[in-house]
């Protein structure tokens, strides 16, 4: 059975406000159930371990998804979510792919987490895909610090500057993710209209722009894994057959 690692933020505080942040719930539950329903085994991890904080805005009625409701009735997943493994105990060798959900939290912790940055390179060096959605691509910042030039010329999707402004949180974050990724050399592509789904695939990097992109990003990762496991057809051309002695 293929195994997918999901790396969640442990950060909950925002700047210049009493508002809280954390994991955007649908960006975790939408991909999680895509993976589970496709037959994958999923492991959850976070920098501090235990239960990650959840962005309260992602639990508002207008942001609830079908997977959120499924999560509320899933005692097994709720228990796993409350007991995530500490990130520094994770090894890429044990998994086939990694997925970073968003929520604003990653721009504080995963963006500067050395364990996460090393993990990303370990996956890519082993030919394993790395996926991230919304603010999840903030994890690429540390990966770029680990290896300068890592993002140069990479085409990715991430939460856009326009979307940051429209949600009213641009004054409560230390930087805008799109601008930061572009400063590091990435080409950030976005949907023509803010908050519409948008996914980019650049080699083993699979990225989505916003909450609506979470499930499509997961599906793109599943497709990538399926392509990696396809067995090439064996030639039946008699002229090319060789006898085994």
Image: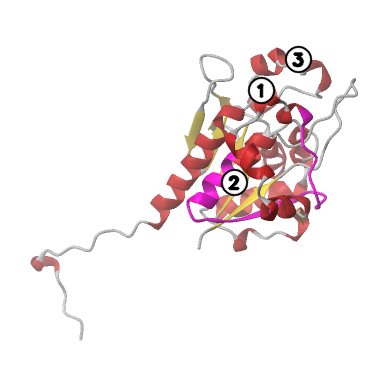
Residue 105 position within the rendered picture, expressed as x and y whole percent measured from the top left: 77, 34
Residue 157 visible to the viewer: no
Picture quarter containing residue 13? top right
Picture quarter containing residue 241? bottom left
Q: Which residue is mark 3?
A: 168
Residue 63 position within the rendered picture, expressed as x and y whole percent measured from the top left: 66, 26
138 to 89, vertically: above or below: above
Left or right of 111, for residue 156: left
- Gap in angstroms between the C-alphas marked 3 and 2: 28 Å
Which sits earlier in the primary sequence, circle 1 or circle 3?
Answer: 1
- Judged by depth in the image, the label closer to the viewer, 1 or 2, is 1
Which sits earlier in the primary sequence, circle 3 or circle 2?
Answer: 2
35 to 202, vertically: above or below: below
Q: Secondary structure at mark 2?
A: helix
In magenta, the rendered stretch is 30-56
Dot 3 crowding, Cα within 10 Å, few <14, some 14–19, many 20+: few
Given residues 55 and 103, the one toward you in this image is: 55
Q: Which residue is mark 2?
A: 32
- Judged by depth in the image, the label closer to the viewer, 3 or 2, is 2
Q: Which mark is residue 62?
A: 1
Residue 7 position within the rendered picture, expressed as x and y whole percent measured from the top left: 69, 47
């Amino acid at each position: 059975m293929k195994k997918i690692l999901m790396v969640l933020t442990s950060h909950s505080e925002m700047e210049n406000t009493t508002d809280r942040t954390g994991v955007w719930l649908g960006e975790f539950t939408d991909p999680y159930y895509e993976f589970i329903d496709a037959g994958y085994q999923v492991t959850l991890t976070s920098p501090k371990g235990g239960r990650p904080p959840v962005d309260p805005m992602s639990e508002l009625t207008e942001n609830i998804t079908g997977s959120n409701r499924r999560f509320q009735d899933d005692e097994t997943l709720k228990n796993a979510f409350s007991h995530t493994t500490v990130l520094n105990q994770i090894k890429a060798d044990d998994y086939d792919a990694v997925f970073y959900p968003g929520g604003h939290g990653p721009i504080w912790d995963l963006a500067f987490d050395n364990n996460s940055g090393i993990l990303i390179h370990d996956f890519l060096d082993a030919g394993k895909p790395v996926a991230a959605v919304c603010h999840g691509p903030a994890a690429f910042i540390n990966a770029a610090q680990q290896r300068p030039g890592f993002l140069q010329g990479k085409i990715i999707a991430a939460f856009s500057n326009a979307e940051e402004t429209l949600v009213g949180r641009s004054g409560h974050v230390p930087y805008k993710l799109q601008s930061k990724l572009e400063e590091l050399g990435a080409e950030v592509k976005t949907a023509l209209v803010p908050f519409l789904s948008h996914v980019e695939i650049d080699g083993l990097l699979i990225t989505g722009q916003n909450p609506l992109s979470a499930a499509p990003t997961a599906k793109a990762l599943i497709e990538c894994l399926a392509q990696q496991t396809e067995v090439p057809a064996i030639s039946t051309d008699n002229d090319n057959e060789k006898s085994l002695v």
